[in-house]
Image (spheres, rainbow, N blue to C red):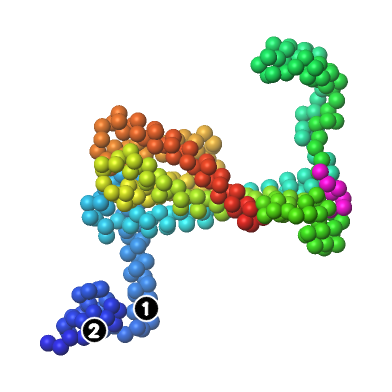
Amino acid sequence: MSQINCQNCDQPFDEGFKFCPHCGQKTNEELTIGVLFYNTISNYFSFDARFLKSFLPLMFRPGYLAKRFLQGKRLMYLHPAQMYLFVSVIFFFLFSFVVADWKKEADAINKKIVSSNNVELIPEDTKKEFDSIQKAQVLNSLKENQKLLGMSDEELKATDSIINSGDSQNLKTSWDFDKKKVDSLIAIGADDSVIYKEMGMSDDPGFFEKRLFSGMLNIVKGTGAGSIIQRAVDAVPIAMFILLPLFALLLKIFYFRRGRYSHHLVFSFYFFSFLFTVFALLLVTDLFLFPIPGWISWLIVLSTFFYFYVALLNFYNRNWFTTFLKCCVITFVFMLMVIPTTGTLLLIFGVMNS
């Protein structure tokens, strides 16, 4: 029997096969409109069916999908990386509606702040003079804790005079440059370098100083606050891209005899998919259905810790007490990793995009 080559993988096979035994593509299929749309729809519904089949176990059977995936059930359920990407895209799409509101509010506050040279640190409705009893209570408290606070007698006397004078004019802050001149330069379209000079930038500024003054100028223009929020949000997906492998590394350290690093990575993909799914459902409910009370949201967020605990129990098959201790330590160490990682990325994004 003669052989032909597959149009997709170029591997030879016996003529008469309807599908390539190497890659599975149909051997003789003309590309028509019907074939094109059939492939598109079949691929979509194949993904959709696997996602629906994976959704309930993901939400209500912690650790089940990861365990089944390692057992070889890799076509019945959505691939862990594919599920993570799919769910995270949906979450960040929904989150963009919240971010848009945050940016509007931030820019509105920013414009109010730059509308005057002096900015009140204390709202008018709270700037009331202390009555004599309140003043006495504050001063007595300071005297009792003078050593603890490290205040000298002179500093205590100065504080006494300020409180008794009721002078609140010192509770203001102002720009360190002539804002009216800066505003006029912005209005006539002056070059940024000229404005930076007026704002006090040195003659030979370094990279970070340039970025700092660039961010200050955006704030003076009334658009800096919203941009800062946007950059912070832009850093989150990259932070998660870094933190997820670190989370898997933590699991590998605490369960170093329980398989390869890739096994822990599978668990991490499914667990983070669960987290993004929970947050996405909260956003959908709050944005389109009804507002969720804050305490309920916090309870739901805290419940993810117990989901993690049960998932560890089911996936690693260890006793409940040891698992609980490891769950607490892993969570604590991971949260310590989240803060510097996210902070560093926010700084980098702020410098690069300001």
Q: Residue at x 50, y 53 (%)?
A: 238
Which of 292/223 is in front? Answer: 223
In this rendering, is residue 40 above or below 354? below
In this rendering, is residue 177 above or below 171? below
Residue at the extreme bottom: 2
Q: Is disc 2 placed on a helix, strand or loop?
A: strand
Question: Label 1 amino acid?
Answer: Leu
Q: Which mark is residue 5?
A: 2
Q: Residues within 10 Å of mark 1 (few under 14, many from 20)?
A: few
Measured as percent of width and height from the top left, residue 16 is found at 17, 84
Which of 289/55 is in front? Answer: 55
Quadrant where the N terminus lies? bottom left
Measured as percent of width and height from the top left, residue 275 is found at 43, 45
User: In the rendered image, is residue 233 in sight?
Assistant: no
The magenta segment is 176-182
Label 1 to label 2, Cα distance in Å?
Answer: 22 Å
Residue at the extreme left: 1
Q: Is disc 1 placed on a helix, strand or loop?
A: helix
Instruction: Please check the rendered image and state whether residue 150 is part of the magenta-colored stretch, yes or no.
Output: no
Instruction: Please check the rendered image and state whether residue 180 is part of the magenta-colored stretch, yes or no.
Output: yes
| Residue receiving disc 1 | 36
Q: Does residue 188 appear left or right of residue 94 in this picture?
A: right
